[in-house]
Amino acid sequence: MPGTFTSKSDPYADAMIVEPSRFVGQVKIDAHYCALIKGSGRRLWDPSYEGVYKKHTAIDFQIVPLDSTHQVVERKIINWTVEFRQVVQPSVETLRPEIAKIRGKDDDNSFVVLRELNGLWVIGEYVPSPSNKEGDTWTTFNFTHVFATREECEAAFESASPQASTTLNAKDRATLADFLPSLWQQSGHDEAKFLKLIADNPLLASEFTVDSPEVTEAMAPFSTEQDSGIPF
């Protein structure tokens, strides 16, 4: 059946796989340092690389699906990429309050969220990677729900309406808004490019438009400098 994942290694079958729109399962995360070596790709960081190669932070994600006949899904990401900064990181940050409850944290800002997300059960969406060029179909993880147990995750996934609301509360919206200034910088302070970056990001596009006060606020410092005649 087209689109069905199997656990067997068969390149003929794999070639016909159509990636689903959502993922559900247990997330496993391995964050570590690495070096990007031309001609060799990504290598685990070795002290002998010091002074020769730049140290990078790599985050490897695995989603072990609820259905054991489906393949484990992996994404290997470097933390400075737009894929991580614009999609994965903000989606994880919006789940911080729920992760805090699950892990028994009194202050949801006092812990390393990726470490605490590791091993929990999640539901999410595959969304286009912001780094895609025209014609590319690469996807990345957009985490939307998190659960303490397999049973909670399975029940939510099978329900017509997952337990967590898809409408962000004020705190989660504020968390996403924190990423707008960096996009404004990335756009080179070009309003059209800035709005396109927002529109191309599924998380941000669902919450912010040109009329959103957070968008206006992100552009405000540069607008003020222009108005005052101060060169940027």
Image (cartoon, rainbow, N blue to C red):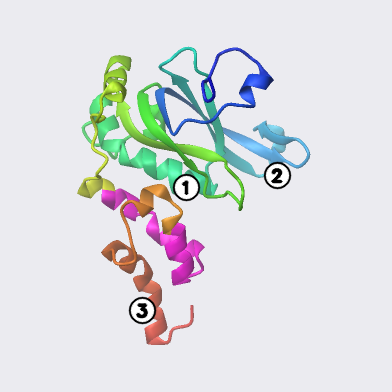
From the viewer's perspective, is 113 left or right of 36? left
Furthest toward the bottom, the residue is 229
Q: Amino acid at mark 2?
A: Gly
Q: What's the residue type where badge 3 is placed?
A: Thr
Query: Mark 2: which secondary structure?
Result: loop
Q: Are marks 2 and 3 in contact (CB under 8 Å)?
A: no
Residue holding disc 2:
51
At a point 30% along the width and 17% down the height, the residue shown is 149
Which mark sits nearer the N-terminus, 2 or 3?
A: 2
Q: Which mark is residue 135?
A: none
The image position of residue 219, as x and y in percent, is: 37, 69
Q: Nearer the viewer, residue 87 or 81?
A: 87
Which residues are drawn in magenta? 173-197
Q: Earlier in the sequence, mark 3 or mark 1?
A: 1
Q: What label sits on residue 85 in the rendered view?
A: 1
Q: Position of residue 3 (x, y in %)?
A: 52, 25
Distance in Å between CA atoms under marks 3 and 1: 27 Å
Q: Is residue 55 above or below residue 223?
A: above
Residue drawn at the location 25% of the way across and 28% of the way down:
160
Q: CA distance from mark 1 to mark 2?
A: 26 Å
Q: In the drawing, what numbered circle is on residue 224?
A: 3
Is residue 38 in sight in this rendering? yes
Snapshot quadrant of residue 181: bottom left
Q: Where does the image place residue 193, in percent across and percent down from the top left? A: 49, 66
| Kind of residue at badge 1 | Arg
Q: Nearer the viewer, residue 201 or 188?
A: 201
Q: Earlier in the sequence, mark 1 or mark 2?
A: 2
